[in-house]
Image (spheres, rainbow, N blue to C red):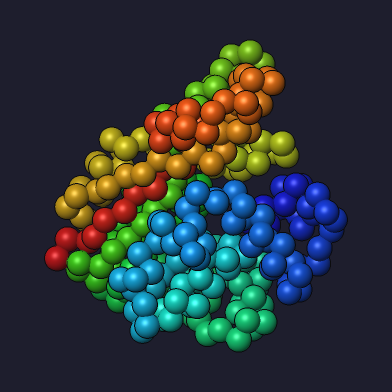
Amino acid sequence: MTYGSVHGHAAYEDGQYTLGTPEFFERVDREFFSWNAPLHDHRPFGRLFPFGSYGQGSRVLEIGCGMGTMAMLWALNGADVTAVDLNPTAVEQTTRRFEIKGLAADIHLEDANRLALPDAHFDYAYSWGVLHHSPNLEQSLSEMMRVLKPGGGFGIMLYNRRSLWHWYLTEYVEGFLHYEKRFLDPLQLASRYGDGYREEGNPHTWPVTRKEMRQALREHCGELKFKILGTELDSVFRTMLPGVGLALPRIVKKSWARRFGWSLWMYGHKKG
């Protein structure tokens, strides 16, 4: 959640920060925004989030708020924000961020599989890089749709199983070259090397496919739209094409990113 150079710690290339300080939140945001630069216009994530459609007074829910960066963006947009997370540290730090910024929100502990929130309450709901850690993804998605108003918008980012990261770094390098497939099943392999792999991975990480997501959301929405985001490809190219990958023309990288990026962004509206 800190996006630090050491997984789960507030350590970065320019030094160690203290959780809960203004400097820490500024450093988190700077790091996170730099990873997602192609998604920004005149404001962070302006090319991705429908800020113009859900502004002043709109009820917006974030499932998995982390350090509160995205929830803050919605609050600054005038939305009535509810931000939830299963991790007490995330709730504590997001609450602290909002206090420092002088912003209001309902920030509290929740399990995405059993949201203690009313039916058809929110105008827009989203989750960024969280629900692929849910052992019961369909239940989490069902809960998100339950609390969303008919016709309400949603956005979900999950890891993409049809990506270079998964195919090359996880399955080929770790699974095949390093013989990890002898000891780990596909879920264990993805959990160990798909996220935070320089440390110990995560207890549960399972990337999805577009076909699976259409199936999971077929009862909840009409047209499900997709964008594949590949801002991590430079990291893949360093291993895949040493010395050559980073010299590839930008247009080539963008083409690969749109087909084989690690982040699958899904969006649409709940059935009326």
Q: Residue at x 38, y 69 (%)?
A: 51
Q: How many marks?
A: 0
In the image, is residue 250 above or below residue 225? above
Q: Residue at x 19, y 50 (%)?
A: 223
Q: Residue at x 62, y 52 (%)?
A: 34
Residue 109: percent from the left, percent from the top? 54, 71
In percent of width and height, residue 92 lies at: 65, 73
Q: Quadrant of residue 91?
A: bottom right
Quarter of the image containing the N terminus? Answer: bottom right
Residue 125: image x %, image y %? 36, 65
Image quarter of the C terminus: bottom left
> Is residue 69 in view from this perspective?
yes
Q: Residue 142's quadrant in the figure? A: bottom left
Q: Is residue 174 visible?
A: no
Q: Is residue 214 left or right of residue 24?
A: left
Residue at the left extreme, as displayed: 272
Tell which of 177 and 165 is nearer to you. Answer: 165
Q: Is residue 228 above or below residue 29?
A: above
Choose between 254 and 224: the one closer to the eye: 254
